[in-house]
Structures are given as C-alpha cells and as structure tokens.
Amino acid sequence: MRLTASLLAICLATGPALAVPNTCTKDADRAAFDTVALKSELMVTALVCKQQDQYNAFMHTYQPSVAGEEKDLAAYFKRAYGRQYQKAYDDYISNLANAQSDEGLKMGTAFCETYTEMFNEVQSLHSGTELADYAHSKALVQPVSFQTCAEMPAKPGRHTKSKKKRTA
C-alpha cells in the first residue's frame, strides 16, 4: 500500500467527534487500537517529514500484521456499534489522523526529530507479532480513552445469582 497525499486528505476529512460506547476493551482490542494508531502515526510522520519510502517499507514488511489488527479493530466496532459500526470506524480513523496531525503542528520542527526514529525502531522488530507491544509502549495520540474489561465497574442493581447444584 503506497502512501499518497490524497490518502492523507481522505483521512484528515473533518468528521464528528467519536462517541465511545460504554464498551470495555479486551487485550486484543487494545492491541488493534494501538497498532492502527501506530500505522496512522507513521503515515502522518511520512507525509509531514517526507519519509514516504520508510512508510512504504514499513507497510511492505508488516502488511499482514497490520491488516489482521485492522480486521480485529473492525470487529470491535461491530460489537460496540452494531449496524452503525462502519460510520463509527471511519470517524475513529479520521479523528485519529486529525489528532495526530494536530499534535505534529503543535510540536513544530520537533515533530520530525521525535517521530522519524520510529521507522528505524519498527524495522528492527523481529516479527509482526511485536508491533502491538511496540505501539503500546509508545505515547501515541488517541482520540478515545479506553477502559479494559477488568476495570469495568459492576452495573448498579444487577446481581449475579449462583446456580444451585441439583442433588439426585
């Protein structure tokens, strides 16, 4: 997948703010969010810092892993938004690129100094399975906040009933 300015223009199209449903994220969901955020950050970095060849090399190396994480992210949006998932997913991708681009504008020239090194770091990984961990270790801009399933508070007024064992 080659990076082009028109692709970034599509991603940067202004969309409404993403309303996150009260859906917790599992570890696999978080890995998908992190990897897609990394891909987006590298795309923004490539365009702003004129590093398209490095982005294309990243995508050539990690396309199968990135595609798998994108599929997992789409599955999360399907669970969270039902029939409205495609719009929510597209809004997320647009808001992600916008937030990362805005961060780049705030940083000025320090942006390229800070983010171009990521191309070397990802190319030094041993496999695509390391991408999510690498992405999670970085302070990547995200337009949403996450609550893991383990952190979800119990809903008030809902109690689980324990099943009684039948005795013969």
Image: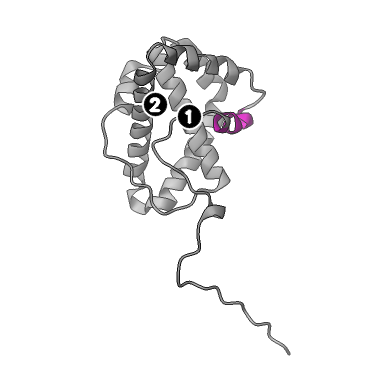
Q: Which residues are magenta?
A: 128-136
Q: Going 56% across and 31% down the picture, which residue do you hit?
A: 65
Residue 143 sits in quarter: top left
User: Quick one: label 2, few (<14), some, or many (20+) residues within 10 Å?
Assistant: many
How far across and down, in percent of the image, does residue 24 sit?
A: 48, 52
Residue 55 seen by the camera = yes
Query: Does residue 98 sit above or below 112 in this rendering?
Result: below
At label 1, the amino acid type is Leu
Return the mark for residue 100: 2
**Residue at disc 2, secondary structure:** helix
Return the mark for residue 54: none
Q: CA distance from mark 1 to mark 2?
A: 8 Å
Lateral position of residue 82 relative to residue 159, left or right: left
Looking at the image, the residue that sits furthest to the bottom is 168
At label 2, the amino acid type is Gln
How far across and down, in percent of the image, does residue 46 sit?
A: 43, 15
Which quarter of the figure is the C terminus placed in?
bottom right
Looking at marks 1 and 2 on the same chain, the residue that comes earlier in the sequence is marked by 2
User: Quick one: label 1, few (<14), some, or many (20+) residues within 10 Å?
Assistant: some
